[in-house]
Amino acid sequence: FGIFSFYANAQSTDSDTFSAKYVTPCGQLLESERENEKTAIWGVKMWLMGYITGRNQESLSKVLGDAKSESIYHHIVRYCRENPFLDVLTGVSELYKDMDFQN
């Protein structure tokens, strides 16, 4: 059972675009959480930190720069419990936008 199935396709055109071909659905994350699948949970934590790092490098900012992976992960688990039909990428994107707006 692999929760951490994600790859992306960056396309260079007139405007830079990013498309996620597969992202972890919230239901799958919650199942891994219930089953205490440590490897899958660790993978999501690392992916979340990589996402934030990438967004910060892109925008030359430090949004959530001091946040711990555990805190961000638990925020996303809570997000998924409230939005079980969405996905991890949507949750972290919304978190990033909310925190960026507050800065």
Image: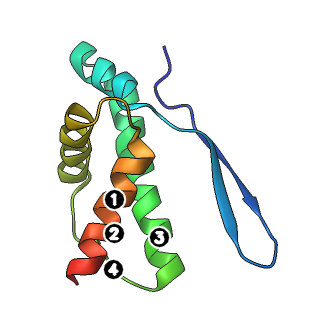
Instruction: Residue 47 in the image: state x and y as whole percent.
Output: 44, 48
Say which element carries label 3: helix
Q: To which residue does mark 2 refer?
A: 97
As shown in the figure, which amino acid type bears the numbered disc 3? Arg
For label 3, count other residues whose C-alpha is less than 10 Å away and answer few (under 14), some (14-19) or many (20+). some
The one nearer the camera, 57 or 100, is 100
Lower position in the chain sequence, tag 4 or tag 3:
3
**Marks 1 and 2 close (CB-CB < 8 Å):** yes
Q: Quadrant of the C terminus?
A: bottom left
For label 4, count other residues whose C-alpha is less than 10 Å away and answer few (under 14), some (14-19) or many (20+). some
**Dot label at residue 62:** 4
Say which element carries label 1: helix
For label 2, count other residues whose C-alpha is less than 10 Å away and answer few (under 14), some (14-19) or many (20+). few
Say which element carries label 2: helix
Residue positioned 40% across, 63% down in the render: 52
Residue furthest to the right: 13
Residue mark closest to the camera, 1 vs 4: 1
Q: To which residue does mark 3 refer?
A: 55
